[in-house]
Amino acid sequence: MNPYAKLTFSMSLVLGTTITASSNHWASAWAGLEINTLAIIPLISKSHHPRAIEAAIKYFLVQAAASTLLLFSSMINAWYTGQWDITQLNHPTSSLLLTAAIAMKLGLVPFHFWFPEV
């Protein structure tokens, strides 16, 4: 992999993490998570081995499903509370969906079956 491309993807990981950690709005937290997802996929599949490509596809599908759950959780919370602020997570369904989405993104039990293969 080109050193400049590797540097760009590494800096994108730092940028996405910073955006996610410093956000107060659901949309900016989601955008930071998506920047991280899009930056790590080329780093996973850089060896061009079929197992690496398979791992990158599995990672992408799981992260896309978790991002969908995160957005759905934020929409439910905004529907019931009228606010898009992260600190105002008051509805129990949105809390449960957010917990499931974060568990999927981190590879926690019971959403961990994809993690060892990636």
Image (tube, rainbow, N blue to C red):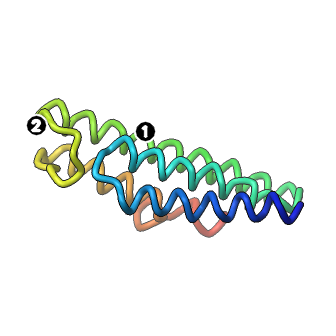
Question: Which residue is at 65% across, 63% downward?
Answer: 11
Residue at mark 2: 81
Q: Amino acid at mark 1?
A: Thr
Disc 2 marks which amino acid?
Thr
Residue density around tag 1, few if under 14, some if 14–19, many if 20 or more, within 10 Å: some
Say which mark, if any, is on residue 26.
Answer: none
Residue sitting at x 60%, y 61%: 13
Determine the secondary structure under disc 1.
Answer: helix
Please say if 91 is above or below 109: above
Where does the N terminus fall, quadrant-wise?
bottom right
Identity of the residue drawn at 30% across and 46% down: 25
Q: Quadrant of the C terminus?
A: bottom right
Looking at the picture, how far across and down is residue 72, in whole percent?
A: 32, 36
- Residue at the farthest top position: 79
Per the model, the C-alpha gap separating discs 2 and 1 is: 20 Å
Q: Nearer the viewer, residue 5 or 42?
A: 5
On screen, residue 17 versus residue 89, left or right, reads right
Q: How many marks?
A: 2
Say which residue label 1 marks: 68
Q: Residue at x 24, y 51 (%)?
A: 86
